[in-house]
Amino acid sequence: MRIILLAAVSLLFLVPAQAGAPMVVKQSPYSVSETLDRLTTIMQKKGLTIFARVNHGAGAKSAGLDLKPTELLIFGNPKLGTPLMQAKREIGVDLPLKALAWRDDAGKVWLGYTKPDTLKARHGISGRDEVFKKMTGALDKLTSAAVKPE
């Protein structure tokens, strides 16, 4: 029984790495802060709006808790987001988009974001496939550029 339970729990940790995972996660050769600095610069050059940057590690520290470096970037493009909100206003809970950079227990840095198709399914939006396709392509290019070794 213990082996079956251990196997089941182990599978839970494998699910995010599978193709159907709701997030895209890329390893970064840079620190958490540098990864988001790079992403911010790239996004600003492309005309995206940076709404906020949240330092979860600093928030934890202010509460007397420890958290490995973890930062969130909140960004968007009203030309893409607005048509989605016109289709289904509730998607506004997931917009603007977000990218999370964090350092894991092994010291590796990761950059992740929710797949646009996950948002499409979560909110049941149809008829806006081109918008989701553009978002998917843009997020892949922008995040890949941010974690590209120099």
Image: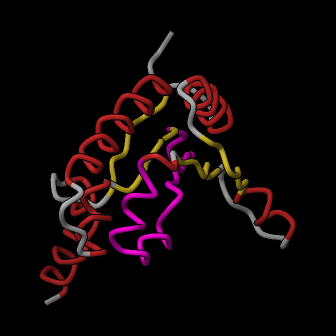
Camera-nearest residue between 142 and 12: 142
Rendered position, 18 above or below 106: below
* Left or right, residue 116 beside residue 3: right
* Left or right, residue 143 beside residue 76: left
Rendered position, 48 above or below 15: above
Residue 81 on image: x %, y %: 44, 55
Camera-nearest residue between 57 and 117: 117
Residue 114 on image: x %, y %: 38, 56
Residue 132 on image: x %, y %: 28, 50
* Left or right, residue 41 beside residue 17: right
* Left or right, residue 100 beside residue 91: right
Query: In the rendered structure, does residue 82 fall within the stretch colored magenta?
Result: yes
**Which residue sits at x=68%, y=51%?**
51
Camera-nearest residue between 140 and 44: 44
Quarter where residue 56 is shown: bottom right
What residue range appears in magenta? 80-108
**Which residue sits at x=65%, y=44%?**
50
**Which residue sits at x=26%, y=64%?**
120
